[in-house]
Image (cartoon, rainbow, N blue to C red):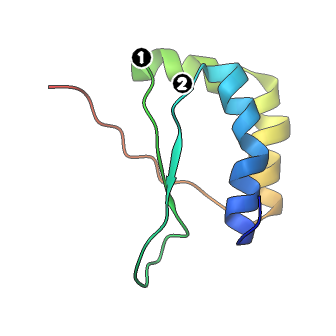
Amino acid sequence: MEGPPALKLWDHLTGWFMTETGIDNSTVLQPTDRSQYAFVNHARWDHGVPRLWLRMFTKPSFWSFVQKNMNENRTGSMPTLCGLA
């Protein structure tokens, strides 16, 4: 993927999230004006937050691959979780 470093990192990590958490509908939304965020990743899982967290945080590869890459690129995330009404 061409573009800013944060989007290159997102593209690099996407396969892990698809394989390890079952996500199949992640979409990158880029700001049209000045923003403190590089982009917003809009995604939906078909299961609840506890199951998602178990699928992510109990895997050693989350820490050795995902978190390591985010730390090396001085990048973080700010999840906003919403439930269906």
Counting residues from the N terminus, which is met first, the one under dot 1 or under dot 2?
A: 1
Does 34 appear above or below 27? below
Q: Secondary structure at mark 2?
A: helix
Q: Quadrant of the N terminus?
A: bottom right
State the image coordinates of residue 39 (x, y, percent, origin top left): 52, 63
Residue at 41% of width from left, 17% of height from top? 46
* Residue 8 falls left or right of residue 46: right
Q: CA distance from mark 1 to mark 2?
A: 13 Å
Which residue type does callout 2 highlight?
Trp
Task: Judge by depth and name the residue closer to the eye, 56 or 12.
Answer: 12
Does 43 appear above or below 50? below
Q: Secondary structure at mark 1?
A: loop
Which residue type does callout 1 highlight?
Asp
- Which image quadrant for residue 19? top right
| Residue holding disc 1 | 46
- Which image quadrant for residue 58? top right
| Residue holding disc 2 | 53
Residue at 29% of width from left, 36% of height from top? 82
State the image coordinates of residue 37 (x, y, percent, origin top left): 49, 70
Does 54 appear above or below 12? above
Residue at 82% of width from left, 29% of height from top? 61
